[in-house]
Amino acid sequence: MDALTIGRRIRQLRTERGMTLEELASAVERVPSQLSMIENGRREPKLTLLQSIARALGSTLDALLETEPLDERSTMEIALEKAMRGQTFQALGIAPFRIGKTVPDDALKAMLALQGEIERLRDERAATPEEARRANVALRRLMRTQDNYFADLEEQARGILEAVDHPGGPLTQRTASDIAAHLGFTLHYVPDLPQTTRSVADIKNGRLYLSSRMASKGDPRTAVLQALSSRILGHREPTSYAEFLRQRVETNYLTGALLIPEAHAVPFLADAKQDRAISIEDLRDAYSVSYETAAHRFTNLATVHLGIPVHFLKVHESGTITKAYENDDVNFPADRLGAIEGQMCCRKWTSRVVFDVDDHFNPYYQYTDTGNGTYWCTARVELSSEGAHSVSVGVRFDDTKWFLGRDTPNRGVSTHSVEACCRRAPADLEAAWRENSWPNVRTPRTLLATLPTGAFPGVDTTDVYEFLEAHAPR
């Protein structure tokens, strides 16, 4: 417990027993000013003094240190004292003041409410688009230095799978339920899950709520494992956008490690490399996961276990890059901060060309010559509620020998570092139409609210809390 709470509890017990500060000070052989500082939380008492105070008050040391809440007035005083010592009051230039007995309870409530609203507004404004891009760049650099491999998360996945006796291979829906039970959760599929969430965990009652419509939207195991991964990793409410991004990466990584276990997948991929037949489709089919999950997981294991540097791209049908990773020196478009996400992918790159391919059953392969060397990529188009996305994995030319599809005749040339490559229209088209056209821009819905507010960006917490209240067991 903090010194302020201990001091308030001493004052509360002293007042209840009708003792003055001077009487208590005399009983413990201290001067009143010393006890006053203890009661006001400005000095942390030694254990021996606390024992003496407890005896003088006819109480026990445990009673002074108990975690039960104080009365409402003391609780508000402590909260306001802590607020006055915090950054918000200091930033506003408000000097701490003594909270006397004559200060009405309503005044304390009003000051705490105002302080809470200021904190909320400050949190809303903290995650600017530039801050988000910086956080994303820093996180991708961390991933690159570790070759997108996180040994601690692999160990977490290994421990969970051993706890539920998973034999390896595809993880079934029943095993996902066993993992939930192992962590103390029961699964509940409901039709009214808040629209801004994929799942809601009721930690108090050990219930995990998921959409009963999930089966028609995607892999039901993924939603379960993503929700449980946050519990496995002990995530707390994020205090910054950087922490929010890090938690999301960790959650997705651990989910992939559970769906495609390292101990089973590495020998599978090593055999494929030996046969010069590595295929993201084969990895997908072997573990019954989506192509994107297989592609992500391949980037986790490829460099550390196979010695193959790789790159990964997820591109929206509009051409916007939504996810990216690379440790093979590929030159992706980036802004001045180094952010790749949000940039337009080159039209000549595999990730864009694949949208124009009619055959969506077979994988698309392409060699692309760049100013930084030749790269080979394999790509597929997947549909989602946000529209079509391409997912591609690629390697340097020298590493193509390990992959199926290396004999593709498809080739492209990308010089996206030069503006004329695709960021500007051909000169004859621009001359003919620039002054004779006016497109009506389809503004992305997130343009003016790039980072939705709140500790969990984009989540309507009122909706979530009302949902939990309605579904909590009575």
Image (cartoon, grey):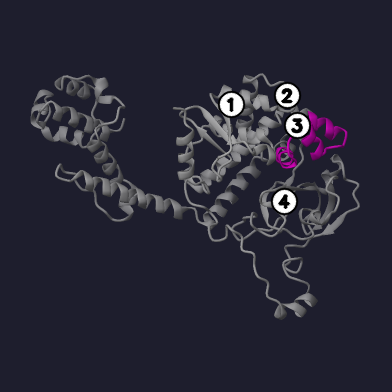
Identify residue type, mark 1: Ala
**Horizontal placement of 244 versus 432: left or right?**
left
Does 157 appear above or below 124? above
Identify residue type, mark 2: Gly
The span from disc 2 to disc 4 (Cα, nearest Å) is 30 Å
Residue 78 in the image: x percent, y percent? Answer: 26, 39
Q: Are marks 2 and 4 in contact (CB under 8 Å)?
A: no
> What residue is disc 2 on?
168
Which of the two discs, 3 and 2, labels the residue nearer the N terminus?
2
Which of the two discs, 1 and 2, labels the residue nearer the N terminus?
2
Q: Which residues are magenta?
A: 268-297
The span from disc 1 to disc 2 (Cα, nearest Å) is 18 Å
Which of the two discs, 2 and 4, labels the residue nearer the N terminus?
2
Identify residue type, mark 3: Tyr
- Quick one: label 4, few (<14), some, or many (20+) residues within 10 Å? many
**Horizontal placement of 64 versus 392: left or right?**
left
Q: Report the mark closest to the observer, 1 or 3.
A: 1
The span from disc 4 to disc 3 (Cα, nearest Å) is 22 Å
Q: Element under label 1?
A: helix
User: Where is the C terminus found, in terms of image quarters?
Assistant: top left
The span from disc 1 to disc 3 (Cα, nearest Å) is 20 Å
> What residue is disc 4 on?
389
> What residue is disc 1 on?
180
**Horizontal placement of 348 versus 245: left or right?**
right
Q: Report the mark closest to the observer, 1 or 2.
A: 1
Magenta region, main secondary structure: helix
Magenta-drawn stretch contains 288: yes
Q: Element under label 2?
A: loop
Instruction: Identify the disc placed on residue 287.
Output: 3
Residue 216 in the image: x percent, y percent? Answer: 69, 40
